[in-house]
Amino acid sequence: MKVLFVSLGCDKNLVDSENMLGMLRESGYEFTDDEEEADVMVVNSCCFIGDAKEESINTIIRLGEYRTDPGKRCRALIVTGCLAQRYADEIRKELPEVDACIGTTAYDRIASAIERVFKGEYVKDLDDIDRVLEPGVNRVVTTGGYYSYLKIAEGCNKLCTYCIIPKLRGHYRSVPMDLLVNEAERLSGKGVRELILVAQETTLYGLDIYGKKSLPELIRRLCRVEGINWIRLLYCYPEEITDELIDVIKREPKVCHYIDMPIQHASDRVLRRMGRRTSLSEIKKLIGRLRERIPDMAIRTTLISGFPGEDEKDHEILLDFVREAGFDRLGVFTYSAEEGTEAARMDDQIEEEVKAKRRDEVMKLQQKIAFERALSMKGRELSVMVEGRLVEEDVYAARTYMDAPGVDGLIFFASERELMSGDMVKVRVTGANEYDLIGELSNESA
């Protein structure tokens, strides 16, 4: 029986998708990318913001046409993930082509859900969102071949006024450290060379089960896994970044000098309305401390434009901050009012046109900063990880320590010898093309 699987949303969702794919493979299912060949279609949905919700619904509707057409092969349409968790009743009422809704921590029962659907049963399996999955269910199947996301925790205890994640994913639950280390060893044995640590918030890792923030200890143990060359940290909330964590990033050679640090805004007034637990002064001090301790640290952040009540003064504070901070990588989202959140009930909602205008102004400023930073890299020699080869242009694409897969830039270079994805070589930067770098293979790599 063949399954077509569509994964939507962020890399944390991708980890869940890979888990489900592994379970289905172990249950004897085959996979296809052809809608005409699929017996079962699975959509792992996202509804974190309005655009993600719309994409999920449109995907379900499109695939639903294959489910309802008697001339097509598909006989089961399964919706998993955040949309299923939040809107299971609405999905059953408004999207009758869907045969099952599987919640965010019930995905370990994906195979049994398909079996139940084929017996004629409608499946609604949302489970307890604070359930800790049994050991083995946390197994992460390799994504990208030579790199893999390693989800170290589930859920969130933050009370950000714009966020629905606690309602969809439950309270913060760390995955036991021994399980993560064992998983890293398994992944290394399968050829993974880069581990990307993810969670809704990685910096709180271990507090719930070990009584202290244990991310530094976890990193040290993962660094001892043979075969792993890079370890990258995503979703590190600024208020939880400790001197111990900074010291580990500095001292452990396998840890990329790269940190993804969601800030969301720079105006103290807006940060308070967002329910964030930091201030502009504290953020500036942290950035200064990071760059003082690790001068070549690449800092990535995300911001929200048009949050309820944000005025022109708040926007100017944000622009000034972006100009001063000089982030290496930055993304901006327009605020999306999500039902059930405190922010959606706030007065002074901002018009969409204003949100978009402010977002574009921040991105225009950041573009200039990013292009200048790329040009400033000329002459530096970097260890890079090969992504693949562009056959038509006869060059290789690789990532530097400053570049997470799928969201950041690339460096392009030629090589007379054949290279494989995951290989690490040294490249000297010779120029830049907007966000991407151009380089040449170092003599040391020959």
Image (tube, rainbow, N blue to C red):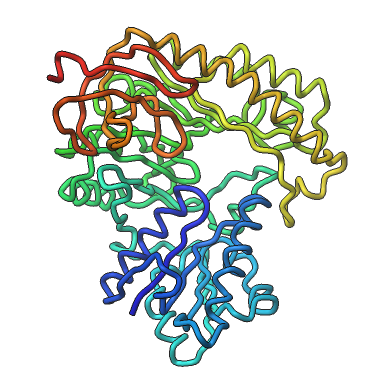
Q: Residue at x 75, y 37 (%)?
A: 307
**Location of residue 34 by image quarter:** bottom left
Does residue 172 appear to the left or right of 139 in the view shown? right
**Location of residue 243 by image quarter:** top left
Above or below: residue 202 compared with residue 34 = above
Q: Residue furthest front?
A: 392
Q: Residue at x 39, y 20 (%)?
A: 437
Q: Nearer the viewer, residue 257 or 445?
A: 445
Residue 217 seen in this snapshot: no
Give the percent coordinates (x, y) of residue 197.
37, 41
Does residue 97 appear to the left or right of 334 in the view shown? left
Does residue 267 appear to the left or right of 386 in the view shown? right
Q: Residue furthest bottom?
A: 119
Give the percent coordinates (x, y) of residue 382.
28, 18
Q: Residue furthest right?
A: 347
**Location of residue 247 by image quarter:** top left
Give the percent coordinates (x, y) of residue 275.
68, 38
Quarter of the image for the C terminus: give it.
top left
Q: Nearer the viewer, residue 331 or 409?
A: 409
Does residue 156 appear to the left or right of 189 in the view shown? right
Give the percent coordinates (x, y) of residue 281.
63, 17
Count of numbered tags: 0
Residue 108 seen in this snapshot: yes
Quarter of the image for the N terminus: give it.
bottom left
Above or below: residue 136 compared with residue 254 = below
Q: Residue at x 41, y 73 (%)?
A: 110
Q: Residue at x 23, y 44 (%)?
A: 192
Q: Nearer the viewer, residue 1 or 238?
A: 1
Above or below: residue 200 compared with residue 73 = above
